């Protein structure tokens, strides 16, 4: 299940990451078309991030690799 998530929610999930590092990583993932960034011009304004199709394919591929590695042990 792939849903959109806000910056602060993501930061809480990634315990210990700084705002600057998370922003830099997200910017790179958006540039690589792995993550989609959507800005909502509401009051208060907010931004949500979600996986693109490329991102979903990457997660699936990494999951398959992780499963293969665990089967080798």
Image: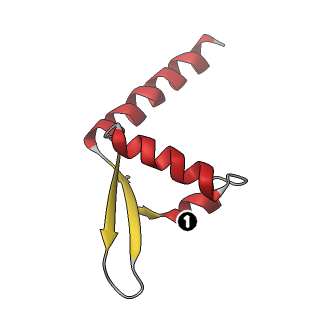
Mark 1 lies on a secondary structure that is helix
Q: Is residue 62 visible?
A: yes
Left or right placement of residue 20 versus residue 62 in this view: right
* Left or right: residue 46 compared with residue 57: right
Residue 3 in view in this figure: no
Q: Residues within 10 Å of mark 1 (few under 14, many from 20)?
A: few
* Residue 22 image position (x, y, % from top left): 57, 51
Number of on-image labels? 1
> Is 48 situated above or below 69?
below
- Residue drawn at x 64%, y 52% is 14
Give left or right: position of 33 versus 10. left
Residue at the (39%, 79%) spot, across then down:
45
Residue at image point 42% right, 85% down: 44
Direction from residue 64 to residue 9 in the image, left or right? right
Quarter of the image where one finds residue 56: top left
- Which percent across, then down, holds residue 69? 57, 17
Q: Is residue 60 above or below residue 43?
A: above
In this view, the residue farthest toward the bottom is: 43
Q: Residue furthest right?
A: 16
Q: Residue furthest top?
A: 72
Relative to 9, does residue 23 appear above or below in the rendering?
A: above
Choose between 2 and 68: the one closer to the eye.
Answer: 2
| Residue under numbered circle 1 | 9
Colouring chosen for the image of the structure: secondary structure
x and y percentages locating residue 46 in the rendered image: 41, 74
Q: Position of residue 73 (x, y in %)?
A: 66, 13
- Dividing the picture into quadrants, the one containing residue 58 is top left
């Amino acid at each position: 299940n792939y849903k959109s998530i806000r910056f602060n929610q993501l930061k809480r999930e990634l315990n210990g990451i700084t705002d600057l590092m998370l922003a830099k990583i997200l910017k790179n993932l958006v540039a690589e078309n792995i993550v989609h960034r959507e800005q909502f011009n509401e009051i208060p304004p907010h931004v949500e991030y979600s996986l693109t199709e490329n991102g979903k394919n990457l997660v699936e591929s990494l999951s398959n690799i992780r499963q293969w590695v665990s089967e080798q042990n």
